[in-house]
Amino acid sequence: MTDSEMMQKSILYRKHVLTYIKHANAGHTGGSLSCVDILNVLYNRILRVTPQTFTDPQRDYFIQSKGHSVEALYVVLADLGFFPESDLMTLCRRGSHYVGHPTRKVRGIEHNTGALGHGLSFSAGVALAGKKDKAGYKVYTLLGDGELTEGSNWEALLTASHSQLDNLVAIVDYNRLQITGWTKDVCDTDPLEAKFAAFGWSVRRIDGHSIPALTQTLRAAPFEKNKPSMVIAHTVKGKGVSFIENNFKWHHHVPTEAEYVQAIGELDQALADVVKKAKKSR
Amino acid sequence: MGNLKLGKSNLEVFSETLMVLAEKDKDIIAVTSDSRGSGKLVPFGERFPDQIVEIGIAEQNMVGVAAGLASRGKKVFVVSPASFLISRAIEQIKNDVCYADFPVKLVGISAGVSYGALGSTHHSLHDIAALRAVHNISIIVPADNFETRESIRLSAGMEHPVYIRFGKKAIEHLHSPDAVFKAGKAIVVREGGDVAFIATGETVVQAVLAAERLERAGISTRVVSMHTVKPLDGDAVLETARKCRALITVEEHLVHGGLGEACAGHLMQAGVSLPFKIVGMRDEYTVTGSQSDIFEANGITGTGLSETAMQLLPRA
């Protein structure tokens, strides 16, 4: 896929996220929209995992620590064929495996997350097993910036650097918002880069919506031998829809019919613009 | 003590058993929180340096890492003082281990009041209650060296989470060499028909001592080692209630939420009623002293338990 095709895919993913959240009348809209490009690049360009190789111990592993953004993950996994997309019509419905946070009952999902501050420790354990078994796989985990106030993350950061887990790559979806408001107002965790570096990680800071930047950076991991890699991906919560962007009220707000129509209209326009631009440059 | 012969500490037996298992199986991994000394795992670490993971004093992370290792097929024994392991890491235990169903073996060392005079920060009198309320974990509290060895061996092959907790003092042998250990299946230590003790862990010895005293007074006493508190051997509870006129449960745990309430709940729901007493640590500040001092203060001695039985029997 070209970068332009990847951008088009991200827009389609965003449309699907909104569709399923609206259908379920539940979901984490802002955070799902902010991490779409990260998941898109991971699953379509980086991770060595497919529905067919999902049970292969040598596959790459992805653990979504910020489990509340599961709708984005479901949409990407469905697109890759891990399960039929129609399954998502059961999202949050009684008896469905498609819970409002990831569970292993859904094919493609490695770990049950949702309580915050858990994914990095688990990922470090998977990476450590890889080192012990001299396996070639890598482990990727997506953290929310809001969840970084959980102390367990910092314990896990220590284990990863102490154990020289250069097969571990963490990405912070740095959208600077959480349910109450701006993270800097709730409990400021900045400067993150210096903190992660002080904890022994090799850190890069990128535009988390740039397909080329995400691709180039994630392909470059490990950034340093014997060090775990940290990507601070600058994102916009609610990315792609004007009235959802940077508005903490959309943390888990479900669009009304009118909001949905407007949002889809904006995304369709964005899609048309990307396609037009691609045609022009050809 | 009484007619019972003193064995090793269950802690020692645990570490020896883990060494034997690790020798044959390279997937056995011990995960510690600066607790290899307390867990008697220094020789293990020296012999199997690739099979021990030192996390440092960070129990939440320790359990999360353990779940990750277990997800890759490692047979992970998390070895940490029971008090800190079950309090500090309860969310990781609930989510990363039990909800996600990775077969981590949580080993709570220095459990109950075995830290004695070090005080309440180090006591775990809540761990069984906490984990009884978490779905998908077995709770095993071995009484002696035999039960410890067998539960550790068994747990290595378990496909679901398990919590095993024990103390660190040398403990008397309870079982004959032909005893059989099965998770979820209580062991009748001695038969009797007047009064019964259903006990767990290091209190079983005290129940046996009480039974010896009661026998001398002509009271026939049944003693059951309920090593698996969850899933509870409900059949053994009902059988004991049928055979005896009064029933006393004994545990090194607060009187709330542990073995006693599990037995009471089972009896009530089966419609069985008999004079019944839960003996454990009272819901109050724990007296300062050794494990034996604290046992004595709470009536968990041969004398204390036999007195409890004498008080209960006239109500039968």
Image (cartoon, coloured by chain):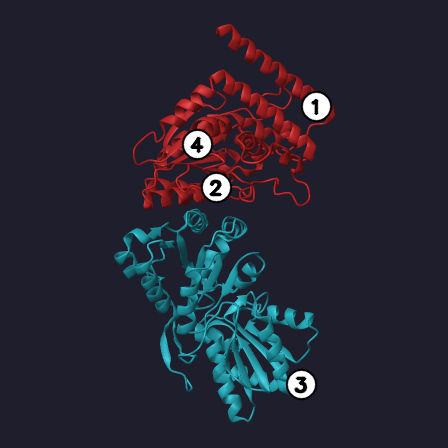
Chain colours: A red, B cyan
Label 4 sits on residue: A47
Label 2 sits on residue: A119
User: For the residues carrying marks 4 and 1, which lies nearer the camera in this image?
Assistant: 4
Ranked by sequence position, the earlier of labels 4 and 1 is 4
The amino acid pointed to by label 4 is Leu
For mark 4, name the chain: A
The amino acid pointed to by label 1 is Glu
Q: Secondary structure at mark 3?
A: loop
Label 3 sits on residue: B316
Report if the CB atoms under discs 1 and 2 are less than 8 Å apart: no
Give the residue at the far right of this rendering.
A257
Check if mark 4 and mark 2 are on a common chain.
yes
Q: Please indicate, yes or no, whether residue B110 appears anywhere in the rendered image.
A: no
Ranked by sequence position, the earlier of labels 4 and 2 is 4
Q: How far separated are the C-alphas under marks 4 and 1? A: 34 Å
**Mark 1, other Cα within 10 Å: few <14 / some 14–19 / many ≥20:** some
